[in-house]
Image: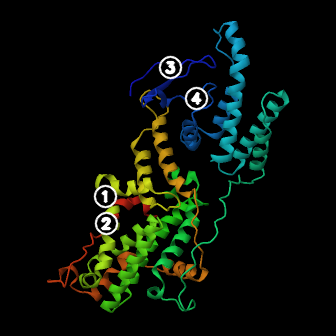
Amino acid sequence: MAQQDAIERIDSGCHDSTDGVAGNKNEEMIKAGTLPFLVENLTRHDKLDAAFNRTFLATYTYFTSGSELLDHLVDRFDNTPPPSTIQTEIEQWSIHTIPLIRLRVVNILRQWLEHFWSEPKGPETDDLLHKMRLFVERVNSAAETPTQQLDLIIQRRISGQPYTKRSHPSISNPPKPILPRKLDKLQFIKIDAKEIARQLTILEAQTFSKIQRHEFLHKNWQKKTTPLVAPNVRWLIRHSNQLSNWVCGTVLAESDLKKRAQVVDHLVNVATTCHQLQNYSAVISILSGLESAPIYRLARTWAMVTERSCNLLRPLQAMIVSSQNYQAYRETLRVAVPPCIPFLGLFLKDLTFIEDGNPALTPEGMINFHKYSMLATTVQDVQRWKEAPYCLQPVPELQEYFTKQLHSAVELHEMWDKSCELEPKGRGLGNRPRDLYTPTGGMSASMVVACMVLDD
């Protein structure tokens, strides 16, 4: 990346930067820069770059601290023109430029506190908030910039009250649940596949909607701190693995060959409905269970699976084929309209590669802002699926049943002996009655990678 000339503006001194040109509109795309330059771009008087601002505020913890950021914003608010500026330009600066800069600073502080606050609870954060409060009081006394709303937000943060996001409009008339005859004696095979998919989707959506942006940053989902810094992402990882294990265990629980094939058929119907609900997390977890080694080897079972189920499985498998970096799955997500629950494994893999594969600083010692732009874009891709809620009705008895089933699921490596006991010859079977569908055997392993493995 070539080093370009530093940008000079009349509203500030000269700060080092490296810029690129995006598209045909000669729009600036900041690739790297010093912290003073990035803060200056954050609060420019002549341009509002909302995408840059979101990226900066979403990822600032990688290259600065909250206290240092506040210091730079205060300095920016108190900005003076360069010493060489002539008197007429100083007058123009005082009348037109500095009021806009100060308004930008106040707006950035408000955005930071409302939508991008990533500071941990503790004495240092309390000191930071009180420091902000003193700054606001100083600004108010000068009666230069309206800061009443900012002051209220700071007070709310100091008192520990979280910022309340705008709630989604209530959705009425969800589809009527398809209930089994006996809710007190539930059996998987007798529960309607569509309702199983709905209840699994509700369970995942409840936690997916709670994920905070910082849970995806700094590989927080891999950290076992107390309290956990990524509790919701870790819950979804564990849920995904448990669902896969439960699928495998549910198939192997049937000693009768015909009933075992019927369980596979039922699971395929569940996965198909999850796909229709755009719960791709559950789709991939169910397929992962069906493709696991203990199930993959059951040649007699797969020979008994209906042709209809085999035909339903093929497009689901094609959606998550690994060719061209999972292009088919990425395209599916790109055109999907919320609500949607994506499979997190691929996003966590992307985030890990971005973090590990890109330096924090450029060879010139500047902040590699291009790295943080990629991180912020990837996180935003996940966050946007939370924009709309599912219109589904929970059934407490079914949710409790599936929660217990998933929590009691054993690990895959413990199921191999059971599989060999049910069908000793496995894939070594000679002439099979038919071969309508051939599992690939662990097809999602490369998608999951180590990102979906919790070191508990």
Could you tell me if residue 294 is visible in this image?
A: no
Q: Report which residue position mark 2 lands on.
A: 443
The residue type indicated by label 1 comes to Ser
The numbered dot on residue 41 is: 4
Q: Earlier in the sequence, mark 1 or mark 3?
A: 3
> Under tag 2, what secondary structure?
loop
The front one of 175 and 216 is: 175
> Do the numbered discs 1 and 2 sit on residues whose CB atoms are within 8 Å?
yes
Q: CA distance from mark 2 to mark 4?
A: 45 Å
**In front: label 1 or label 3:** 1
Residue 93 marker: none
Q: Are marks 1 and 3 in contact (CB under 8 Å)?
A: no
Q: Is residue 310 left or right of residue 239?
A: left
Label 2 sits on what residue type? Met
Q: Which residue is mark 3?
A: 6
Q: Position of residue 290 (x, y in %)?
A: 34, 75
